[in-house]
Amino acid sequence: MVALQPLMVTGLFILNNKERRITMSVNFDPIFYGMQNGTEKIKGNFDKINEGRQWGASQSATPGPGTEGAFTYKVRNDNQFVVITFWPTGIKTHPERVAYLPTSITTRMLTFDFIGRTDNGGYGTMRVDGDTGKCTFWANDDGGIYIQQTVALK
């Protein structure tokens, strides 16, 4: 019989206009006690859910000439989503700064316009050209733009 570890669930709740952190533990063994192969079945179901749903390694996008910042992405193993995490800097005074994502990803993206927050409390945008992979940026100040998006792929 497979012993399942208790599931720990933590959440933030508002109760009487006050923020409360609550942690619960659910022990599955008593729930499935007496059920033939109950714990094995539930563990197998969780394993099936996780297969192909894990994320691949973080990869670097290609910054254009003179572009500064950090540019990473990772694709989920089932190729259904990509997480883009970019932090271009100095965009207001250098709008020519760009980065490139692989076209093997951008030609499959379902969304191409993104918004982010700048270091100085402003905002900025990123537009992805699906055909070329070119990412262009705009910002209302010269702080770095934090852009983190999960994008569905077709």
Image: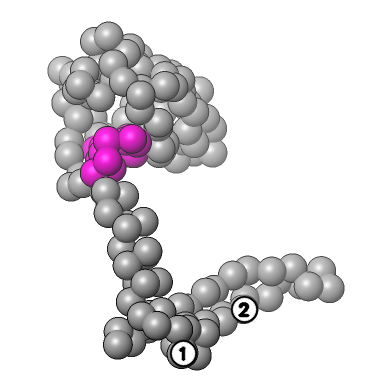
Image quarter of residue 147: top left
| Mark identifier at residue 141 | none
Q: In this view, does 61 lie to the left or right of 136?
A: left
The amino acid sitting under disc 2 is: Ile
Decide: few, some or many residues near mark 2? Use Cα within 10 Å; few <14, some 14-19, many ≥20: few
* 94, 38: nearer the viewer: 38
Image quarter of residue 73: top left
Residue 50: percent from left, percent from top:
32, 57
According to the image, label 2 marks what residue? 22
Asked whether 1 falls inside the magenta stretch, the response is: no
* 66, 22: nearer the viewer: 22
According to the image, label 1 marks what residue? 33
Coloration mode: one colour
The kind of secondary structure element at disc 1 is loop
Residue at 49% across, 28% down: 115
Q: Is residue 73 left or right of residue 119?
A: left
Residue at 84% across, 73% down: 16
The dominant secondary structure in magenta is strand
Q: Which residue lies furthest to the top in this view?
A: 131
- Calculate the distance from the C-alpha at mark 2 to the C-alpha at mark 1: 27 Å
Image quarter of residue 152: top left
> Where the N terminus falls, by quadrant?
bottom left
Highlighted magenta segment, given as a residue range:
72-87
Residue at 27% across, 54% down: 51
User: Which circle's residue, 2 or 1, is located before the other in the chain?
Assistant: 2
Asked whether 82 falls inside the magenta stretch, the response is: yes
Decide: few, some or many residues near mark 1? Use Cα within 10 Å; few <14, some 14-19, many ≥20: few
Residue at 32% across, 13% down: 130
The amino acid sitting under disc 1 is: Tyr
